[in-house]
Image (spheres, rainbow, N blue to C red):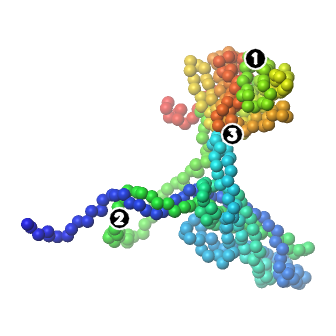
Amino acid sequence: MKPIRGSQLTPNNVQEECIRVSKVYDWVFDAISTDTGITLPDDCAAAVAAAVAAGRTPLDVTCEVPDVGGFFPLDPPDTDGNALCTVSSRIERREIPLGGRLVEVAIVKVIFTIRPLITIFDSTGAIICQFRPTISESRRLVVCAPEPFTADNVFCRLISLDCDTNFIETGDPDLGLQVMLDICFEIQVEADVKLEVLAKFCFPRPNDIELPTNGVCPEFEWPAQCDFFPRDNCDCQAFVDTDPLTGPVDITFAPILFDAPLAAGTYTTELNAEICDNCQLTGSTISWIVEDFVVPTGTGTGTVDQSFTFTASEIGMPECTEVLGVTTMTVEGAGTVSFADPGVADRTVLFTLTLVENIGSADDTYAITLTDLAGTALITFAAAAVDFVPDEDLVVQDCVTFPNLLDD
């Protein structure tokens, strides 16, 4: 048997490892502004009055805030208690509509305590007095902090502070000091978790990167365009302005809307919508008005006025298709239904609206369905297959976008 010569190789292959890390469940940036009237301490007020009496005006006031470190380092500097961000121990939990469905969220309260350094100068530049007022402000935020998380899992960090002042330079009748603060902060929800990962151990690298001996110019780059401007272009746009139309108007109501059983009603329907004007979604509006002009429509002992107004509050990007010259726009979103009958409560609903632009001067049509947040149909107007809207009252047309031009 030959002896083993040289060094033995220790395998360092990728393998399953269990590690403990801090998982980030949510991470929120926000900013608030405050405008606070400041009362001068007694000794400072006396010194200011003496300076005004001696004619050492106009006065000047500066405001300094402590350095809170910015985005980095992750461990903020010590501000001696002059800039604090505290999360209240009480976490409120509730369900709210989000993205078209009910989601359970946590609501946390964050308290900011800032003690800026206020310095008052006379007209010669001499310091009259200095003091640190305590300014408190709070903000409630929605975060992901599932049970059994507590406030110990929620961390608040100040990113930046800016301070400015308003005051009366003559000191007459008093300084009238106001301090404005801009507070930028982040909220992070964390918890230690154990993860099984595929990994291998790291080893140090050799010092094999040489410093350049000559001057080095930075790489030239154009500033990146902000992702919120320009806004996305719509693929199509629509305008609808109908008079109250009487037929055919076949509207179906879900029984859960009304306490009394309903007989078939007779209605007018009026739709007003402006969607993607100038091919931009911003400013789009949708309003649907249905009038029940044979009231009551209840059966048995109940009577119900089924008239209502639907107003969209959130409108999604529309989609358009064209088949054999007929253009169809479909748009979804959310809004509120307000009933004329005081016994029927207003509802937050989701909607799907379909607009059909027929060929030439032929009548057009539309259909709309309102559902609850779970997707159950509440009010349905399925008239898209019947042409009853005058052509000039409903217009759907294409928007020319950059992809259209590139495809050409």
Residue 16: x and y in percent read: 36, 57
Which image quarter: residue 185?
Answer: bottom right
Which quadrant of the figure contains the N terminus?
bottom left
Residue 371: x and y in percent read: 68, 33
Badge 3 marks a residue whose secondary structure is strand
N-term mark: 3 or 2: 2
Give the Cα distance between marks 3 and 2.
Answer: 51 Å
N-term mark: 1 or 2: 2
**Residue named by callout 3:** 314
Give the Cα distance between marks 3 and 1.
Answer: 28 Å
**Residue named by callout 1:** 247
Please tell me which residue is depicted at 84% across the width and 20% down the height of the picture. Answer: 294
Asked if 372 appears above or below 165 in the picture, the reply is above
* Closer mark to the observer between disc 1 and disc 2: 2
**Residue named by callout 2:** 201
Please tell me which residue is depicted at 83% across the width and 79% down the height of the picture. Answer: 41
Give the Cα distance between marks 1 and 2.
Answer: 75 Å
Please tell me which residue is depicted at 50% across the width and 30% down the height of the picture. Answer: 408
Mark 2: give few (<14), some (14-19) or many (20+) Cα within 10 Å.
few
Residue 295: x and y in percent read: 85, 22
